Amino acid sequence: MEANASVDMFSKVLENQLLQTTKLVEEHLDSEIQKLDQMDEDELERLKEKRLEALKKAQQQKQEWLSKGHGEYREIPSERDFFQEVKESKKVVCHFYRDSTFRCKILDRHLVILSKKHLETKFLKLNVEKAPFLCERLRIKVIPTLALVKDGKTQDFVVGFSDLGNTDDFTTETLEWRLGCSDILNYRGGLPWWLSGKEYACQCRRHVFNPWEDPTCLRATKPVHKSLQLWSLCSRAWEPQLPNPCATATEGCTP
């Protein structure tokens, strides 16, 4: 009974979001068409030149990314290379792996796909046995771990598969969503299926809630995605969690 109610609630929220998005898109298109109808030949020519310039800049940016090693998922040999790589690129995902850990190979498959899709982000892997100092500095205890580096600073981590549905069978889209939550790549999709209509606990385990009824954590620290204003993140990401005695906690969460 409660499960059906949650599904119905999720369907209504999704339907309302789609209707609002469709309306906004239609209004924007009508506005653009009206502007075009009112333009003279000189204005149309200037618009054409502006768009050609934007395409030229986009192509230059693509070539710059490729020259810095974007567009492929590759291994770096040492800690020294890590610091050089993150200095060169604005957004970097680095997979700290060990050959004997089979889940690292699962991550490898997904990262190969994402590296080709998201040229704006550099995708690397580093063997933890060759990076003891870096692992200690970043406090990497669990393998695999993804370090998410932006502007030369490590701003987030994906530790194991807990943020990916707690399963070895997570999809590439789920990992893409999780990385998008940290703004380490440009993500335009929706929520993974396992996040829909469930109860969640923030990673600090201080309270449990249903995000469709209470869309924010008591102490939200990060937005999930620009198009999903209902959601907030406490610490890193929401995890499926059964109700517990802390479900009615009134104090804030500590990241």
Image: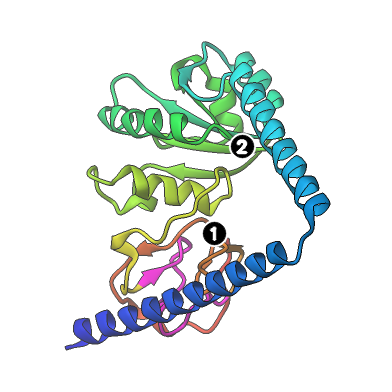
Mark 1 or 2 closer to N-term? 2
Q: Where are the magenta residues, as a range?
A: 200-218
Residue 7 appears in the picture as rendered? yes
Specify how the rendered protein is coloured.
rainbow
Quarter of the picture holding the N terminus? bottom left
Q: Residue furthest top?
A: 77
Position of 42 relative to 53 (above/below) = below
Q: Which of 138 and 64 is in front in this view?
A: 64
User: The C terminus is located in which quarter?
Assistant: bottom right
Q: Amino acid under label 1? A: Ser
Q: Nearer the viewer, mark 1 or mark 2?
A: 2
| Helix, strand or loop for disc 1 | loop
Q: Where residue 235 is drawn, which disc sits there?
A: 1
Front residue of 73/104: it is 73
Q: On the image, numbered disc 2 is attached to which residue?
A: 149
- Vertical relation: 66 (above or below) 230: above
Mark 1–mark 2 contact, CB under 8 Å? no
At 39% from the left edge and 52% from the top edge, which residue is drawn? 163
- The residue at 31%/73% (across/down) is 198
Q: Could you tell me residue 116's position as x and y percent?
A: 45, 29
Residue type, mark 2 in image? Val
Main secondary structure found in the magenta portion: loop
Residue 17 placement: quadrant: bottom left
Q: Position of residue 108 (x, y in %)?
A: 35, 28
Mark 2 crowd level (few <14, some 14–19, many ≥20, 10 Å Cα):
many
